[in-house]
Image: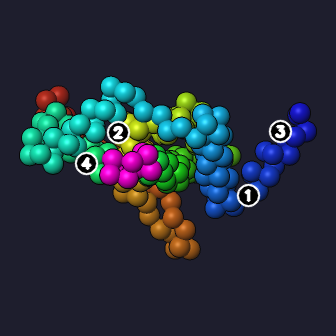
């Protein structure tokens, strides 16, 4: 077992970023397929939650807009009803595709944070992408599964914004992160200090 783990560590350490990303995304798809086969290809719905979204979509098209929720997901659920059972599978497929894309977003974020340790970034993302509880959550007809992927996107944009803001190029064209120091010009006045 130790030799297998050591070999896997060496392969992942020498693999390209695209290869690692493909392994992460393929693994998440395999976990989804495993859960679908295990569940008899039944798409789970939470009766209270899923039904309220479907009924909110019906009310939206009737002109009664629910002020407590955004109309996008209820409208998608309502339109999926016209396709019968296939509609629920399409919603689950949409959520699964967004989740697989969010694996890429999280991997890019982990690469920014753990720039010197690619295998650590891979392991962090694998804990998210191959987590049976998270993947099962994605296969349920619930808006929270899309929200989880959106939170990953938001996290990536925040990290990227912070990281890109302080990047500089040297004479050889290499990119480096620049450290910053904030100076408060009002604070010295309170302590009777001066800048020199």
Q: Nearer the viewer, residue 123 or 89?
A: 89
- Mark 1 and mark 3 lie on one chain; the one further toward the N terminus is 3
Foreground tag (1 vs 2): 2
Is 46 displayed left or right of 27 in the figure? left
**Residue labelled with disc 2:** 143
Tag 4 near tag 2, CB within 8 Å = no
Query: What secondary structure is marked by label 1?
Result: loop
Which of discs 4 and 2 lies nearer the camera? The answer is: 4
Confirm or deny contact between disc 1 and disc 2 (CB under 8 A).
no
Region in magenta: 80-88
Q: Nearer the viewer, mark 4 or mark 3?
A: 4
Residue 162: tell me if it is visible.
no
Q: Secondary structure at mark 4?
A: helix
| Image location (x, y in percent) of residue 100 | 53, 51
Number of residues whose C-alpha sits closer than 10 Å to that of mark 2, classed few (under 14), some (14–19) or many (20 or more) = some
Q: Where the N terminus falls, by quadrant?
A: top right
Nearer-N-terminus badge (2/3): 3
- Magenta stretch encompasses residue 24: no
Residue displayed at 15% across by 48% down: 61
Q: Which residue has dot 3 on it?
A: 5
> Is the Cβ of the residue at disc 1 closer than 8 Å to that at disc 3?
no
Question: Could you say whether the residue bearing mark 2 is in a helix, strand or loop?
Answer: helix
Query: In the orientation shown, which residue stands out farthest toward the bottom?
Result: 172
Q: CA distance from mark 4 to mark 3?
A: 47 Å
> In the rendered image, which residue does mark 1 sit on?
15
* Disc number lying in front (1 or 4): 4
Kindly identify which numbered label has been placed on residue 75. 4
Task: Tell me whether the residue at label 4 lies in contact with that at label 3, contact meaning CB atoms closer than 8 angstroms.
Answer: no
10 Å crowding of disc 1: few (<14), some (14-19), many (20+): some
């Amino acid at each position: 077992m130790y030799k297998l783990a050591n070999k896997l560590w060496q392969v992942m350490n020498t693999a390209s970023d695209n290869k690692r990303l493909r392994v992460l995304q393929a693994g998440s798809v395999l976990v989804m397929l495993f859960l679908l086969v295990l569940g008899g290809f039944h798409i789970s719905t939470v009766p209270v939650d899923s039904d309220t979204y479907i009924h909110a979509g019906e009310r939206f098209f009737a002109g009664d807009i629910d002020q407590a929720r955004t109309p996008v997901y209820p409208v998608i659920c309502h339109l999926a009803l016209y396709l019968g059972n296939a509609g629920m599978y399409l919603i689950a497929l949409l959520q699964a595709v967004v989740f697989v894309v969010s694996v890429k977003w999280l991997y890019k974020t982990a690469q920014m944070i753990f720039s010197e340790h690619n295998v650590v970034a891979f392991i962090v993302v694998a804990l998210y992408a191959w987590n049976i509880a998270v993947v099962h959550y994605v296969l349920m007809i619930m808006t929270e599964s899309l929200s989880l992927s959106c939170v990953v996107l938001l996290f990536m944009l925040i990290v990227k914004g912070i990281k890109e803001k302080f990047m500089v190029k040297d004479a050889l064209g290499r990119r480096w992160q620049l450290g910053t120091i904030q100076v408060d010009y009002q604070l010295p006045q309170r302590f009777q200090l001066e800048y020199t």
